[in-house]
Image (spheres, coloured by chain):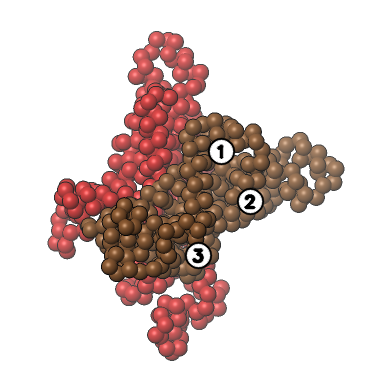
Chain colours: A brown, B red
Amino acid sequence: MAAASISDDPGLLRTLAERRSVLIAMLVFGLILAAAILAPLIAPADPAKMAVRARLSPPFGDYLLGADAFGRDVASRLLYAGRVSLLIGVGTALVATVAGIAIGLLAGFFSRLDAPLSRLIDAMMAFPDILLAISLVAIFGGSIANVILALSIVYTPRIARIVRAATLVIRELPFVEAARALGTGNLSIMTLHILPNIVSPVTVQATFIFAYAMLAEAGLSFLGVGVDPSIPTWGTMVNEGRQYIDQAAFLIFFPGIAVSVAVLSLQLIGDGLRDALDPRLAKEL
Amino acid sequence: MKLYILKRLVGMVVVVFLVLTIAFVIVRLAPGDPAALMLGPDATPADAAELRARLGLDRPIPVQYLTFIVNALQGDLGQSLFFNRPVLSVLAERVEPTAFLALFSLAISVVIALPLGIFVAYRRGSFLDQSAVSVAMLAASVPSFWTGLVLQRYLATDLGWFPASGYGGPDATFLDRMGYLMLPSIVLGIVNSALILRFTRASMLDVLGEDYIRTARSKGMTEGRVVLRHAMKNAAIPIVTVVGLTFALLVSGAVVTERVFNIPGMGNLVVGAVLRRDYPVIQGTLVVVATLYILINLAVDLLYLVIDKRVRY
């Protein structure tokens, strides 16, 4: 994610790893990421293969994490579902970040655009995120790309607002004035002088959006209005398992724990990044 | 100050207008013919044409837009395709459970998070502080529908402490109905507490570091008085803000929680509307909820004037 661009700075990683909770969170999240990427190699079974006789087999027997109502291997489904959930999270974080930077820079840099864009951001943020997301998915349809698009629309205003606020401050600083005096164009000022100075708050916020988007995706899939129910995600797994909660509660436990652990570690990393990049931000954002 | 209030009101009108515009645009973003989408695959072209005419979709977009805005300002958000009744009256029937669910969970989270947040800020770095912060972080990471399902399974189905789902029959008394909201409110309250706790703690920490707090202490003022009278007063603004902001979180939470506990509120209505492609209801819910959010946050801003005498706009 966006963190990659700054992780080649060894100072930052070291600062991050100094806090034990953040270090653990990075390890856990790295593990989840690796497991999802390597799913085809490490999954014990084909996630779609049904075996009627294994229906609702309890965990820690023939099946490591049990089998679902169709006798499909829960552990394998969990790994494959993680790919989709993480993809939606990272996709949303990236799209929302790019769009939010563009809108925020325009609003913060050009005074004339500020009022209309800011009011638009206010209006977008008046819609509760799940409500806006399900409405958008209802309109666009439930493919993975559409869910990413819908969630990106929901979260773009958050990035835009932060970028706008930072741009308003930075554009008045002497080095921007100096660049302007040298005849630097608006576009260059924005990309070369302002953008590098807003990387920190944006990275922090993007990490949180990654986490929120995964939570929102789980919520959408649980409601049956997210990605197509045939695609396993952690949310759809909980939704499917719900019917069997009295006989086989493990069906909702594992995907629920997976999404919680992933979101928790992302939030811890986000907090760590925030403190490491700028201690003052902890108060402002 | 009057000027400020006037400015805020004008700003609010603009944002509400934009909310209406966004809701109008969203429904028209649908690829293809919205009428055909609403009717489903079995509809004949004639049916679609009829629905288009009924919804005014056959008219030019600017005309549709103007009609929508003018009607909305008169309190007419269109007709539900499924219920065949005005959207607002459909929504009005579903307000009670959602409003009380939001209210109860807000009350629960304020009662838990406010005193705890103040206390742990005061005992910064203590074991209790660290535990509270970690638990809050965890609570904010667990999907609320999952907490709901787990508590429903064990506290309601197994132990029978709460009704497991529903909202009582048609002749359930008000108290009965509220009983059905207990467990859902607790679930939503837990999630909401996490946010309020973090905010309360952070704003108390800010204030407790101020010079005047040291002055108050050096005057020999009791700790209780320092924290509750001096610090609390100034920490109140960010706390009131976050309580206003959690409204959006509560509505999002209610959508999901109502689904878990099968409560016939606005959340359930809108999810049903999405599954049935009842676009006017989706549009109407978006408009109503967003407008409410704007009004609540306006009220919060105006509340600052009362809380903090220094705030002069």
Left or right placement of residue B46 versus residue B7 in this view: left
Q: Between A13 and B134, which is closer to the camera in this rendering?
A: A13
Q: CA distance from mark 1 to mark 2?
A: 19 Å
Q: Earlier in the sequence, mark 1 or mark 2?
A: 2
Q: Is the residue under label 1 in contact with that under label 3 (CB below 8 Å)?
A: no
Q: Which residue is mark 3?
A: A144
Q: In this view of the protein, can residue B283 be seen by the observer?
A: no
- Residue at disc 1, secondary structure: helix
Q: Are marks 1 and 2 on the same chain?
A: yes
Numbered label attached to residue A102: none
Residue A63 in percent (x, y) is at 34, 57
Q: In this rendering, do the residues under marks 3 and 1 share a single chain? A: yes
Mark 2 vs 3, N-terminal side: 2
Where is residue B151 shown, x and y percent of the image? 26, 49
| Rendered position, A108 above or below B123 | below
Q: CA distance from mark 2 to mark 3?
A: 23 Å
B14, B112: nearer the viewer: B112
Amino acid at pointer 1: Leu
Q: Which residue is mark 2?
A: A101
Task: Say what amino acid the circle numbered 3 marks.
Answer: Ile
Q: In 3D space, how far apart are the residues under numbered discs 3 and 1 (Cα atoms)? A: 28 Å
Q: Residue under label 1, please give it.
A: A273
